[in-house]
Amino acid sequence: MRIAVLGVGSIGGVVLGALSDTDADLVAVSRGQAASNLEMIGLILHTPEGSIEMIPPDRFTVVDSQEGPISEQIRGTCDVAIICGKASSTSVLAQIAEEVLTPIGLAISIQNGLGHTEMLAHRLGRDRILGGSITHGAWKDGESGIHWVGRGAVRMGYLDGGEASNSALGLLQVFEAANLNPIWSDDVKNIVWRKLLLNAAINPVCAIAGVRNGALLEVPELWDQAMAAMLEAAAVARASGVDLGDVDLEAHLRKVVETTSENRCSMLQDVMAGRATEIDSLCGAVVERGESLGIPTPANQSLHALVKGIERSGEFS
């Protein structure tokens, strides 16, 4: 099976590194200096158990998305495209996925937020798209070192539900061999929204305050903001037809924050590096859908505005 990993940042690096231990033929799609480093140095993966894996550059074929058309050696040859890039690059990555996949190849988005799978489906068709959510924790050290700081799972499924096809089963088997803990779901909408609830609660508050996740439990005002955003997002999810069950949202958030207390969330990493964040596909998406459903979302609206202000001011760059 030939698998393309589109966007080799922190999570993309974990996926690429884990898949390197399998028999899969790998294509790494990155850009600029990051692509150059992958091609010359390879990938340095720090595992959750404390070991360091040096993955040589000949383990995968590197494609620099800034260098123009995809080569004929890669075009139309991939069985799966795993979309790991930031929300702002989804449209470009969707185009690349269309170019690298075989006519029956599958694309799966494991990005944060809403709207990514719909963009992919517009290009490839709903029957070729898997929605997904990844809970492995990671951060990127410079341009080539990936720190895999916590093991989680990869949940996935078709947009319209149903059992896994032969192609999807093949991907599940490869993920299992890579110790990525894949879990199939017939309700991927629920999976995506549950991840969004956590991201909307943790990421913007920690990014604005400039703190690690654990500070949410230490500063009551930060916790109140996070819970307000989460409860609003849950109300929008339920109004959108998502069955969240009878989960205790506050207990769930507390458990996740405790588990990841030392983590700098991806949005905080972005603002510290002066990069655009994923706030539009998180709090921005909650606000937009809330408006269409007549549900007020003042906490998400405030967090969205504050993070956009930080982006524009370059305060953390």
Image (cartoon, rainbow, N blue to C red):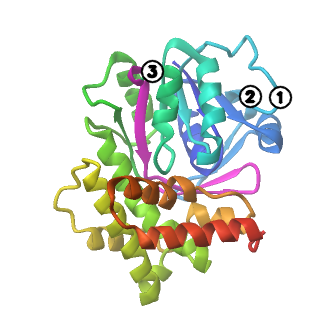
Above or below for 125 versus 104 = below
In screen coordinates, is 160 left or right of 125? Answer: left
Q: Of residues 151 and 242, which is closer to you in this image?
A: 242
Q: Please name the residue shown 22% across and 68% down the image.
A: 248
Instruction: Identify which amino acid the numbered label 2 is placed on.
Output: Val
Instruction: Identify which amino acid the numbered label 3 is placed on.
Output: Gly
* Residue 271 spot, x, y in % from top left: 68, 66
Sequence-earlier tag: 2 or 3: 2
In screen coordinates, is 74 left or right of 266? Answer: right
Q: Residue furthest left?
A: 246
**Numbered disc 2: secondary structure:** strand
* Residue 263 spot, x, y in % from top left: 54, 69
Residue tagged by mark 1?
67
Mark nearer the viewer, 1 or 2 = 1
Q: Is residue 131 visible?
A: yes
Q: Do the residues labelled 1 and 2 touch (CB within 8 Å)?
A: yes
Point out the stretch of residues depicted in magenta: 126-150
Magenta segment's dominant SS is strand
- Cα distance in 3D space between marks 2 and 3: 24 Å
Residue tagged by mark 2?
63
Sequence-earlier tag: 1 or 3: 1
Above or below for 43 versus 64 = below
Residue tagged by mark 3?
125
Q: Identify the image quadrant of residue 297.
A: bottom left
* Residue 209 spot, x, y in % from top left: 59, 80
Mark 3 is surrounded, within 10 Å at the Cα level, by few (under 14), some (14 to 19) or many (20 or more) other residues, namely: few
Q: Are marks 2 and 3 in contact (CB under 8 Å)?
A: no
**Numbered disc 1: secondary structure:** loop
Mark 2 is surrounded, within 10 Å at the Cα level, by few (under 14), some (14 to 19) or many (20 or more) other residues, namely: many
**Numbered disc 3: secondary structure:** loop
